[in-house]
Image: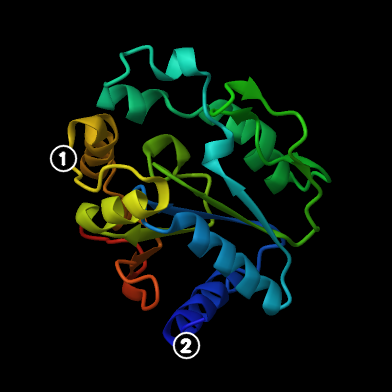
Amino acid sequence: MNPIKTKLLEQVARTILASDKDRAIVAVDGVDGSGKTSFADEAANTLQGLGRPALRASIDGFHRPRALRYARGRNSPEGYFLDSYDYDTFRRDLLDPFRSGARLVRTARFDHRTDREVTTAVSAPDARSILLVDGMFLHRDELMDCWDFSVFLDVPFAVSYRRMAARDGSNPDPDAPENHRYLEAQRIYLRRCNPRDRAGLLIDNADFDAPRIVRDGPRRDR
């Protein structure tokens, strides 16, 4: 791994460890294509290298059924922002049990690709595990009290959509009609929830190999 990235991940891991909680929950947020999953995986590996158990999960394991996700229309940005995820189940099955010290937690409840419930995604966290959750919209109002620490990976849409095109074969133009639902939903989120300001750590992740800390701590002058 690039030494610049290694150093940053170690800094992030030590910041997380500074809370000294037996169990801590960390959010890794960002727009589509910002590198959330990779960053959370690497942060978990870094924590484990420092001697702290880490558990991984994603909000993507807590989608709502297709009929509910598209109830406002298949092209609705509001529908994507408001209806994609089942936050009640997310808290009930993962966050609350993990924080209370439960021996078993569910790390996923619904597979949006098959539109079916998941029953086998169960993990047994260590008594001092750190849970790292990646996903979209994690700094929205109803989740802000869930996190002991949070990261927002800041990446311009022009960059993130090129990444997704290379990964998924999608259209690299953010303003292409087929991207409208998702792009505008993310703009709604950025405008309404100000995740760049709310995050405990704001990281410029436009260059995967050389991420850069922009701000340490949420903005106090919002």
Tell me where residue 47 appears, x and y as whole percent: 64, 72
Number of other residues with Cα within 10 Å of mark 1, as a class: few under 14, some 14 to 19, many 20 or more: some
Please name the residue shown 53% across and 38% down the image: 60
Which residue is painted at 68% across and 47% down in the image?
99
Is residue 222 something that shows in the picture? no
Residue shown at the point (35%, 67%) measured from the top left = 203
Is disc 2 in contact with disc 1, using a CB cutoff of under 8 Å?
A: no
Question: Is 115 rendered above or below residue 57?
Answer: above
Front residue (pair 104, 156): 156
Residue under the point 35% across and 50% down: 164
Instruction: Classify residue 120 by image quadrant.
Output: top right
Mark 1 = which residue? Answer: 175
Q: Decide which of 222, 170 is in the foreground and name it.
A: 170
Instruction: Identify residue type, mark 1.
Output: Asp
Residue 139 location (% of width, % of height): 39, 46
Please state if 88 lies on the left or on the right of 3 as rendered.
right
The 10 Å Cα crowd at callout 2, few under 14, some 14 to 19, many 20 or more, is few
Q: Is residue 85 left or right of residue 124?
A: left
In this rendering, is residue 103 above or below 11?
above
Residue 22 appears in which quarter of the rendering?
A: bottom right
Q: Earlier in the sequence, mark 2 or mark 1?
A: 2
Kindly state the secondary structure of the residue where label 2 is placed: helix
For the C terminus, the image quarter is bottom left
Helix, strand or loop at mark 1: loop
In the image, 99: left or right of 91?
right
Q: Mark 2 vs mark 1: give the one in front.
A: 1
Q: Nearer the viewer, residue 153 or 159?
A: 159
| Residue ID for mark 2 | 3
Q: Nearer the viewer, residue 156 or 53?
A: 156
